[in-house]
Amino acid sequence: MDAFTNSQLALRNGQDREEVWIAYKGLIYDVSRSRFWKTGNHYEHWAGQDLTDELKDAPHTEKVFDKFEVVGKLKT
């Protein structure tokens, strides 16, 4: 599995490239096909970032990530 830095993740923000990625618990998910992430943001959350700490404020659980492809892991 490929590993990506925070800087590489930040480039997949829905603005700079076609890919829209987010990280959660060390894994990077491709959310490009989600209608909620088409513009690179979903409510107050922005793509290209690690959203691990932000999930506690979401109206859903981490199960939401089950429907997205894992494209790599986040380098620490």
Image (tube, rainbow, N blue to C red):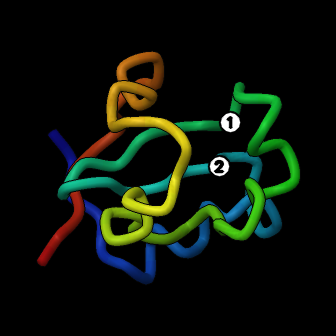
> Which x, y percent locates residue 51?
42, 64
> Which x, y percent locates residue 60?
48, 37
Residue 75 against residue 42 in the figure, above or below:
below
Q: Quadrant of residue 71?
A: top left
Please state the total of marks drawn on the protein image: 2
Q: Amino acid at mark 1?
A: Ser
What residue do we see at 74% from left, 54% from top?
42
Q: Nearer the viewer, residue 3 or 33?
A: 33
Q: Is residue 70 toward the left or the right of residue 35 in the image? A: left
CA gap between label 2 and label 1 equals 5 Å
Q: Amino acid at mark 2?
A: Val
- Residue linked to disc 1: 32
Residue 20 is labelled as 2
Q: Contact, CB < 8 Å: mark 2 with mark 1? A: yes
Query: Local crowd at mark 2 within 10 Å, few (<14), some, or many (≥20)?
Result: many
Q: Nearer the viewer, residue 24 or 32?
A: 24
Q: Residue furthest bottom?
A: 7
